[in-house]
Image (cartoon, coloured by chain):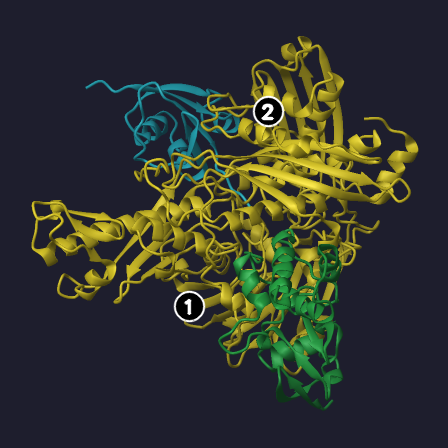
Chain colours: A yellow, B green, C cyan
């Protein structure tokens, strides 16, 4: 990518950095925007999915005869209707996709591996008949012992989910199967020697419960597939190209025969980068010859879609008395859920990444257990390991009597710092965010009775990858921008802003949409904090191509040498001997002459963007603990994050607010609660308690800008790292308030009370 | 079983529909009347995405049966703007970037309008407690609260 | 014209699988394409794996693996697991 980063000292930015109204805003505030569940087609059938009542069971047989015979039922399917998939891990090791696993998660084959696991599906003339049909499907289960907790799943006597699972990453390979899918280790220097040289060592263990991404919109889609072999899907997802690829693979179709329309999406946070209902609806549609709509209930969302991992972790940090960290060790055990693929590798890489530590060992275990397969959740894995590392950092700072921010600052990584997993950091930002909180007046503000303050820092990679964009100049000189990136948080505004800035035109002259999979080149998921970065690069590149073409047309119109034309201030200008005498040509003027100069004016750019800078965030949390109830009230929360450059500051702030609040919920209330039989007890928003408006104060977002030279506007991904330090910030604040350190999340009132009563010291 | 025939007023217009006994008002709005602006987030009255007003009273339409709307005045998000003019709350939500994914927004707007109808000058705390029944997972509520307070200010003429 | 050499490092799981544990290599290369070809010649099959399943950190800066990346002499290349977010 050779677009040079614009230096604001050299050229004032006119659009980037302002706060215009998003182009898709009016439909969203008037109820006209259409999400996955909002589509309908004539003759549409309703699909519904039968789910396992058991946490772990062998499927002996499935009898669908009675269901098929029910009037109004048009098709009933089971896993037998999906082609089998080869067992092999494909794609990135950290999130390796194995279609053998995926097809079984979509619909169970030999076994059901969690309560809520899909077993069969029906398509019927209405919801009521579909629901009644499910009740007529007879499944003969042989219940098996189950295991959910990660430590329990690792015990040698634990029930096995896969009788042939041999742990990968261990030499020599174990001779017995287990639930440990993989072991990962990163090592730097000599941790043993490092700890031997330390003046003080703190070692602590932690546990976290699984939490769900909690998007308000359940998964839903409409599929229209025909017997001839093509189909379309309207789905809310974080990546319609990924939906297309997975559906094609699972149904044994060519990718080009599937068209996915990007419905608006009602929240994803990583949980909608995978598929659940889409291939089922597609297959039902193909079988019935009618469109089929499936929308998950909230209960199904909690029971059958991936929450993130619960974990069991031990962190050890050794320091010199002056505060320098000399050694760190972390062991992170993560629930993968029913199939391998927890984000434990991310966790092992991110946990110590904010710091310059010469000796590090970071070990991760990916462990299967009888709960839904884990799905990505905002900086997957990193918030979990950060909770353990940042709590331990806090304890270390206290032990040596050092200010916790100054302790972090002293050890902060910067460009050139060696990471535990190999390369050196190539970007700054960590120290800047720590300083932003250190220098904030709130850091010195006094605290009252039962109040406490906690700080934490965190790291996340941020992604680049494949993105496509088209830019067209319409007949009147307005600009149409299309990308393949689902808009989950206002990115259409940022795309329009970057295009307007590049072209030198007003924001209102540019409109941005999200195109379907047939209308634009491959674009990877909206996730990993990649859209403003990677898709932004594609947009700018497409704009630059359009600018080159506009100059070519202007040269034709003026009948001058192409080399004498430049684009400046939204116009083509002549630089030759007649410069100043020839009126500049606006987009509108050139567009008016498009036909005689060669035809419509537009360009596409597809990129595989690299050079994404990682995210750093440092957070401060003030709490007040009620000693009678154990309830924790958030008094103040400040998040300082290096965003590179904020294209639209309001939407960037929104990401910081949103991520922090998810972290607060994770810290204080959210958890999956299972009964002894492995049934989820709190599969609804009443008892799976996410933060509500009255729980919170205003969150203060501090946008630190250390521009990324690899993006034309200096953008660093902003969506994810904000959640990484949040749980630790809250935990450290609670510890500061009550003088006891809780080492289990969530810190719900009963646990806080128990800590107060027991006198467990931090 | 035969369906029920219901007549009511919807966003100021007379409306009639057929519905089954067990269908909620939410089901009716979305599936029978094709008004998909009101969203189902949970179906159990916990998230507020399905908020509408019935005879001026803020309710979760997933907790109201279709038949219960007989003879009543229902107002949904589709009726909030007046022709070309957005309601001040709608405008302020856009100005303040009070929505990210937007799925909770219809419910929050309906709930906010109901608040300001009863209390045109709420404090931040009063807004937060009134909106406690409307879950938002994207925004952390900051900009929603700011937008509601700003809209209230404009509607008071101050 | 002499090509400059790059220090190329594979993470443990890659080296365990494909290179009998050897993790570090000095490879003469002008572009990433040269590096991948050189490794694939020594360890058949490794090239495809690197292309499909890894990202690459060149002097710390993380990129998707692409043939055309030009390499400065003496640069440090790490093949790391591909990154996915949420």
- In the picture, the quarter occupied by the C terminus of chain A is top right
Instruction: Report x, y in % for residue A147.
Output: 76, 44
Residue B106 visible in the snapshot: no
> For the residues marked 1 and 2, what is the alpha-carbon distance in whole angstroms?
47 Å
Dot 1: within a 10 Å radius of its alpha carbon, few (fewer than 14), some, or many (20 or more) residues? some
Near-viewer residue (A693 or C52): A693
Of helix, strand and loop, which one carries label 1?
loop
Residue under numbered circle 1: A230
Near-viewer residue (C79 or A403): A403
Residue under numbered circle 2: A171
Is the residue A164 above or below the residue A50 in the image?
above
Q: Is residue A585 left or right of residue A744?
A: left
Q: Residue at x 35, y 53 (%)?
A: A500
Q: Report the residue that reaches farthest toward the front.
A: B158
The chain identifier of the residue carrying mark 2 reads A
Q: Is residue A94 left or right of residue B131?
A: left
Q: Residue at x 74, y 42 (%)?
A: A635
Q: Who comes first in sequence, dot 1 or dot 2?
A: 2
Near-viewer residue (A230 or A490): A490
Is the residue A377 above or below the residue A255 in the image?
above
- In the picture, the quarter occupied by the N terminus of chain A is top left
Rendered image: mark on residue A42: none
């Amino acid at each position: 990518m050779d677009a040079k980063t614009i230096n604001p000292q050299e050229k004032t930015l006119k659009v980037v950095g302002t706060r215009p109204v998003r182009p898709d805003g009016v439909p969203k505030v008037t109820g006209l925007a259409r999400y996955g569940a909002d589509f309908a087609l004539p003759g549409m059938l309703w699909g519904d999915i039968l789910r396992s009542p058991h946490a772990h069971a062998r499927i002996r047989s499935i009898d669908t005869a009675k269901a098929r015979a029910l009037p109004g039922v048009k098709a009933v399917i089971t896993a037998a209707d999906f082609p089998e998939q080869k067992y092999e891990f494909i794609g990135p090791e950290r999130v390796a996709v194995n279609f053998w696993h995926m097809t079984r998660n979509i619909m169970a084959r030999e076994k059901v591996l969690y309560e809520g696991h899909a077993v069969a599906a029906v398509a019927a003339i209405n919801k009521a008949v579909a629901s009644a049909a499910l009740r007529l499907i007879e499944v003969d289960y042989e219940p098996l012992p189950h295991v959910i907790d990660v430590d329990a799943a690792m015990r040698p006597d634990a029930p096995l989910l896969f009788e042939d699972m041999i742990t990968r990453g261990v030499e020599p390979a174990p001779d017995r199967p287990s639930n440990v899918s993989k072991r990962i280790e990163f090592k730097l220097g000599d941790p043993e020697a490092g700890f031997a040289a330390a003046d003080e060592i703190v070692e602590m263990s932690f546990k976290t419960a699984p939490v769900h991404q909690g998007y308000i919109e359940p998964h839903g889609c409409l599929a229209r597939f025909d017997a001839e072999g093509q189909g379309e899907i309207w789905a809310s997802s974080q990546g319609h190209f990924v939906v297309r690829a997975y559906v094609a693979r699972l149904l044994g179709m060519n990718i080009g025969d599937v068209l996915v329309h990007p419905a608006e999406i009602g929240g994803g946070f990583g949980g909608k980068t995978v598929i659940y209902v889409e291939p089922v609806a597609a297959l039902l549609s193909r079988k019935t010859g009618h469109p089929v709509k499936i929308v998950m209930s909230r209960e199904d969302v909690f029971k059958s879609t991936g929450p993130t991992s619960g974990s069991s972790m031990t962190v050890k940090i050794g320091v010199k008395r002056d505060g320098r960290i000399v050694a760190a060790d972390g062991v992170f055990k993560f629930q993968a859920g029913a199939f391998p693929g927890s984000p434990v590798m991310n966790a092992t890489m991110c946990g110590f990444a904010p710091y310059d530590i010469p000796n590090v060992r970071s070990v991760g275990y990916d462990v299967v257990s009888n709960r839904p397969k884990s799905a990505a959740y905002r900086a997957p894995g990193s918030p979990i390991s950060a909770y353990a590392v940042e709590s331990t950092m806090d304890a270390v700072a206290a032990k040596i009597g050092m200010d916790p921010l100054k302790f972090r600052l002293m050890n902060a990584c910067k460009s050139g710092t060696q990471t535990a997993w190999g390369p050196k950091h190539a970007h700054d930002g960590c120290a800047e965010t720590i300083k932003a909180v250190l220098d904030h007046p709130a850091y010195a503000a006094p605290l009252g009775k039962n109040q406490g303050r906690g700080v934490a820092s965190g790291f996340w990679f941020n992604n680049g990858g494949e993105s496509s964009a088209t830019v067209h100049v319409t007949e009147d000189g307005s600009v149409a921008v299309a990308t393949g990136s689902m808009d989950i948080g206002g990115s259409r505004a940022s795309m329009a802003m970057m295009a307007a800035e590049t072209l030198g035109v007003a924001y209102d002259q540019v409109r941005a949409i999200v195109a379907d999979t047939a209308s634009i080149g491959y674009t990877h998921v909206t996730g990993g904090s990649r859209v403003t970065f990677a898709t932004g690069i594609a947009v700018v590149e497409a704009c630059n191509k359009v600018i080159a073409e506009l100059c070519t047309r202007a040269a034709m119109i003026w009948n001058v040498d192409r080399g004498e034309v430049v684009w400046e201030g939204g116009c083509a200008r002549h630089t030759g001997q007649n410069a100043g005498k020839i009126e500049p040509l606006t987009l509108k003027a050139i567009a008016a002459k498009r036909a005689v100069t060669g035809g419509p004016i537009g360009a596409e750019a597809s990129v595989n963007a690299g050079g994404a800078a990682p995210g750093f965030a440092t957070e401060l949390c003030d709490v007040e603990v009620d000693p009678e109830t154990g309830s924790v009230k958030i008094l103040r929360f400040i998040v300082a994050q290096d965003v590179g450059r904020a294209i639209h500051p309001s939407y960037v702030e929104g990401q910081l607010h949103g991520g922090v609040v998810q972290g607060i919920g994770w810290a204080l209330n959210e958890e999956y609660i299972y009964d002894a039989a492995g049934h989820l007890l709190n599969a609804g928003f009443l008892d799976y308690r996410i933060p509500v408006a009255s729980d919170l104060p205003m969150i203060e977002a501090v946008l630190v800008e250390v521009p990324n030279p690899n993006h034309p506007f200096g953008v660093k991904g902003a969506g994810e790292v904000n959640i990484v330090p949040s749980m630790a910030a809250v935990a450290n604040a609670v510890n500061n308030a009550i003088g006891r350190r809780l080492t289990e999340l969530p810190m719900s009132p009963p646990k806080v009370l128990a800590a107060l009563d027991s006198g467990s010291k931090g | 079983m035969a369906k029920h025939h219901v007549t009511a007023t919807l966003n100021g217009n007379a409306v009639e529909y057929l519905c089954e006994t067990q269908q909620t008002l939410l089901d009716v709005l979305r599936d029978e009347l094709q008004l998909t602006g009101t969203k189902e987030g949970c179906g159990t009255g916990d998230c507020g995405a399905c908020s509408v007003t019935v005879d001026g009273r803020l309710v979760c339409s997933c907790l109201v049966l279709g038949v219960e709307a007989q003879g009543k005045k229902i107002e949904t998000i589709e009726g909030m703007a007046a022709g070309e003019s957005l309601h001040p709350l709608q405008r302020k939500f856009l100005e303040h970037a009070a929505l990210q994914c937007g799925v909770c927004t219809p419910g929050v707007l309906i709930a906010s309008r109901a608040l300001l109808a009863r209390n045109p000058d709420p404090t931040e705390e009063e807004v937060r407690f009134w909106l406690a029944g409307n879950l938002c997972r994207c925004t952390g509520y900051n900009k929603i609260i700011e937008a509601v307070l700003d809209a209230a200010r404009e509607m008071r003429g101050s | 014209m002499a090509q400059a050499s790059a220090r190329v490092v594979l993470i443990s799981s890659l080296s365990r699988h494909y290179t009998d544990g050897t993790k570090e290599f000095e490879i003469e290369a002008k572009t990433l394409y040269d590096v991948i070809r050189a490794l694939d010649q020594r360890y058949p099959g490794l090239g495809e794996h690197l292309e499909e399943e890894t990202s690459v950190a060149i002097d710390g800066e993380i990129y998707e693996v692409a043939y055309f990346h030009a390499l400065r002499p003496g640069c440090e290349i790490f093949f790391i697991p591909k990154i996915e977010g949420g």
